[in-house]
Image (cartoon, rainbow, N blue to C red):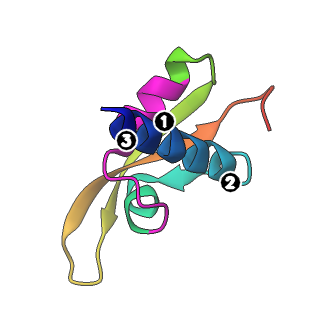
């Protein structure tokens, strides 16, 4: 259980550091930050008081498939 908690904290930290630089999509969080469940990490960070905003949109992949994507950004006051 300790290892799982450690991994969660590491993922929260990676996500938060990236959000301080720029908005992050669910795709980016999964692919580049190695965060399998970005929505869970965002929810946890919000509970810690971080003002993370979500914009939902539809994106088309290079193969023409439409995906629902969330883009997370850090609100004013943190950064």
Residue on which the image places disc 1:
54
Q: Pick whichever, 18 or 12, lies toward us.
A: 12
Residue 41 lies, in percent from the top left, at 43, 36
Q: Secondary structure at mark 3?
A: helix
Image position of 50 with respect to 6: above or below: above
Q: Secondary structure at mark 1?
A: strand
Q: Residue at x 55, y 32 (%)?
A: 53
- Which-is-in-front pick, marks 1 and 3? 3
Q: Is residue 65 magenta?
A: no
Residue on which the image places disc 3:
3
Image quarter where the C terminus lies is: top right
Q: How many dots with numbers?
A: 3
Q: Residue at x 51, y 16 (%)?
A: 47
Residue on which the image places disc 2:
22
First in residue order: circle 2 vs circle 3: 3
Q: Is residue 35 left or right of residue 71?
A: left
Residue 25 lies, in percent from the top left, at 46, 54
State how far apart marks 1 and 3 are (Cα): 29 Å
What stretch of residues is rendered in magenta?
32-45
Q: Residues within 10 Å of mark 2 (few under 14, many from 20)?
A: few
Q: Residue at x 58, y 18 (%)?
A: 48
Q: Are the residues at dot 2 and dot 3 in contact (C-beta closer than 8 Å)? A: no
First in residue order: circle 1 vs circle 3: 3
Image position of 34 with respect to 10: above or below: below
State how far apart marks 1 and 2 are (Cα): 13 Å
State how far apart marks 2 and 3 are (Cα): 29 Å
| Extreme residue in the bottom direction | 63
- Which-is-in-front pick, marks 2 and 3? 3
Q: Residue at x 39, y 44 (%)?
A: 38
Q: Pick whichever, 34 or 65, lies toward us.
A: 34
Residue 31 lies, in percent from the top left, at 39, 67
Q: Residues within 10 Å of mark 3 (few under 14, many from 20)?
A: few
């Amino acid at each position: 259980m300790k290892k799982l908690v450690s991994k969660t904290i590491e993922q929260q930290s990676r996500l938060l550091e990236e959000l301080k630089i720029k908005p992050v999509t669910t795709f980016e969080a999964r692919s580049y930050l190695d965060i399998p469940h970005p929505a869970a990490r965002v929810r946890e960070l919000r509970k810690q008081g971080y003002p993370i905003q979500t914009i939902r949109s539809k994106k088309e992949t290079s193969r023409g498939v439409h995906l629902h994507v969330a883009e997370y950004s850090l609100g004013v006051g943190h950064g």
